[in-house]
Image (spheres, grey):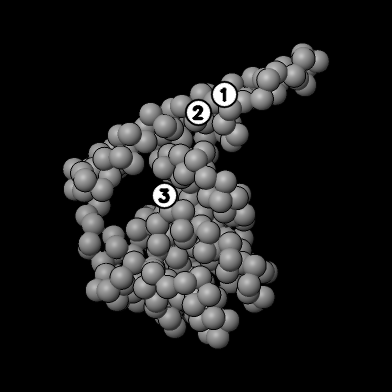
Amino acid sequence: MKTLSAVERPTILSFLNAHGVNLCAGSSAAWSAFRASDVLLRDGVALEMALPWLDQPVGLNMNGTDFIPLLLRHLSPRRVAVYGTASPWLDEGIERLKERTPHDYVDAQHGFHSVEHYIARARELQPDVIVLAMGMPRQEEVAVQLKRALDHRVLIVNGGAIIDFLAGRFTRAPAAVQRIGLEWAFRLVQEPRRLFRRYCVGAFGFAHTVLLMRRAAIRSSGRSSGAPAPAPMHKEL
C-alpha cells in the first residue's frame, strides 16, 4: 500500500485470475500486457490451488473488487480519472466513490473510445490515479499504452468490473460465499450466458495451461541439471 501511494513514474497495478491466465495462454498481446504490470496481484481460488503445484508461493488473495476501494480510501486526496464501462453505471459508480473516498474525480470516460482518446485526456488533465474499468484484456493493453505515453507520476489501476459493482449493475456474492471461494459460481448464476464460457469452458483451458506450465518447469529443471534439452512445446507460455 505504501509503495502504491508514492509512485515515482507511470505505474500499473493489475490483478491476475484464471481468466487472465487463459487470455495470456491464447494471446501474445495479452501476455505482454500483463507482463508490463509493475504490481500483479493474485485474484481467485483457482490460482491459489494451482500455484503450489507450480512450486510458487500462493500469497494473499487480493481481488480488485475489494482491494481497489480499500486502496482509494487509504490514499491521501488525489486527482482521479475513471475510464471504462458506460452510463448510467459509470456515473453512478463514481458517485459511490465520491461518497467513500477523499478524491477529486476529474474525468470520466466510457470504455469504448480509442486508446488515443484516453492518452489525450490523461495528458491534458494529468490525474494522479487512473482507474480502467474495461475488462480483460483491453484494460491491460490500454494501461500499457498509457504508461508509455505519459510522463507524470500516475498510478494506473486495472479494475475490471469494479465500477459496475459499485453502481449496483452486478450484485456481490454474500460474504460466506466469498469466503469459501465460490463468488464465481454466484456470478455465473447471475449471468449464465455471458460467463458460462469463461468459468465452465475456461476451467478446462486453465487446467490444461497449468499442466503445460508444470511440464515446462520440470523440463527446465531437467536441463539445468544436465539433462538433454527436450523438443519444443507446441504452446509457448
SS at badge 3 = loop
Task: Please report the residue visible at 43 percent of the width from the left and 32 percent of the height from the top.
Answer: 206
Q: From the image, tell me which residue sits under label 3.
A: 63
SS at badge 2 = helix
Q: From the image, tell me which residue sits under label 1.
A: 214
Rendering quarter of residue 108 = bottom left
Q: Are marks 2 and 3 in contact (CB under 8 Å)?
A: no
Q: From the image, tell me which residue sits under label 2.
A: 210
Classed neighbour count for the residue bearing mark 2: other residues with Cα under 10 Å, few (<14), some (14–19), many (≥20): many
Q: CA distance from mark 2 to mark 3?
A: 20 Å
Classed neighbour count for the residue bearing mark 3: other residues with Cα under 10 Å, few (<14), some (14–19), many (≥20): some
Residue 21 in the image: state x and y as whole percent: 48, 40
Residue situated in front as seen by the camera: 167 or 137:
137
Q: Is 32 displayed left or right of 19 in the figure?
A: right
Which amino acid type corresponds to the residue marked 2 in the rendered image?
Val
Task: Please report the residue visible at 44 percent of the width from the left and 83 percent of the height from the top.
Answer: 106
Q: CA distance from mark 1 to mark 2?
A: 6 Å
Task: Please report the residue visible at 54 percent of the width from the left and 81 percent of the height from the top.
Answer: 120
Residue 115 in the image: state x and y as whole percent: 51, 70
Residue sitting at the far right:
226
**On-image quarter of the N terminus:** bottom right
Which amino acid type corresponds to the residue marked 1 in the rendered image?
Arg
Residue sitting at the far bottom:
124
Mark 2 or mark 3, whichever is nearer to me: 2
Residue 48 in the image: state x and y as whole percent: 45, 34
Lower sequence index among marks 2 and 3: 3
Lower sequence index among marks 1 and 3: 3
Residue 210 in the image: state x and y as whole percent: 50, 28
Q: How many marks can you see?
A: 3
Q: CA distance from mark 1 to mark 3?
A: 25 Å
